[in-house]
Amino acid sequence: MQHADRPRRSARRATAGRLVAIALAVTGLAVVAIAPAGAATGQTTASEISTTKDAKHGTFLVAGNTVYTLKPSKTACDAKCLKAWPPVLLPAGTTSATAGTGVDASKLGTKATADGSLQVTYGGAPLYWFVKDKAPGEVKGNVTDKWGKWAAVVTKAGTASGGDKNAGSGGVSF
């Protein structure tokens, strides 16, 4: 009798195992589907640009996480690029960014994106986040890739001119 019971238990275990595998697969897909396309913090918009400072990079712009500019290469920043480098967009209904501590308000602006959203600019350069920056103040995006040279926006806090002759380590001065 035990022998006849074993196949049914094995079948039940196999079915239960498949259901668990399916549930995990569906859950995993759901997590991927709801993950934001914006910065690692989940941020896709920002209305205030401010500064932070560290010994290695100096004073640089942040909107939650560090923001970057792009000196483009011959390869245009396409959809794949924008997944790694999401643009800093204003929230719907907001028409201008606010200058936080250490930011020269006269250098803040916007440019319209293809879908009509407003991307924040600084000194005329569009701003982007880098998805590998996991926390405010991290600077992992001073890199060159096929889309060009990305650099944190280094500025001098508390000056009206906003100019810092030393971009620190790998940033771009404004």
Image (cartoon, rainbow, N blue to C red):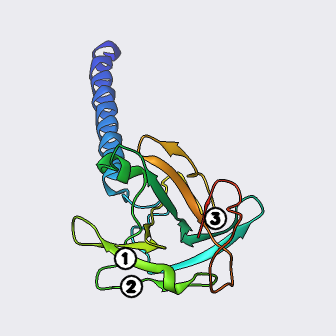
Residue 10 picture quarter = top left
The residue lying at 41 percent from left, 68 percent from top is 88
Q: What residue type is labelled 1?
A: Thr
- Amino acid type, label 3: Gly
Which circle's residue, 3 or 2, is located before the other in the chain?
Answer: 2
Q: Nearer the viewer, residue 124 or 40?
A: 124
Q: Is residue 63 visible?
A: yes
Whether residues under marks 1 and 2 lie with C-beta atoms below 8 angstroms apart, the answer is: yes
Label 3: how many Cα within 10 Å (few below 14, some 14–19, many 20+): many
| Badge 1 element | strand
Q: Position of residue 2 (x, y in %)?
A: 34, 16
- The residue singled out by tag 1 in the image is 110
Q: Nearer the viewer, mark 1 or mark 3?
A: 1
**Cα–Cα span, label 1 and label 3:** 23 Å
First in sequence: mark 1 vs mark 3: 1
Real-space CA distance between mark 1 and mark 2, rounded to the nearest whole angstrom: 7 Å
> What residue is drawn where x is 66% and y is 72%?
52
Residue bearing mark 2: 96
Where does the image place residue 70, in percent across and percent down from the top left? 46, 56
Q: Quarter holding the N terminus?
A: top left
Q: In which quarter of the image is residue 51?
A: bottom right
Q: Where is residue 163 in the image (x, y as percent from the top left)?
A: 64, 74
The residue under the point 30% across, 52% down is 33
Disc 2 residue type (three-letter): Ser
Q: Residue furthest right?
A: 55
Q: Judging from the image, what secondary structure is the residue with disc 2 in?
A: loop
Q: In the rendering, which numbered label is found on residue 137? A: 3
Q: In which quarter of the image is the C terminus?
A: bottom right
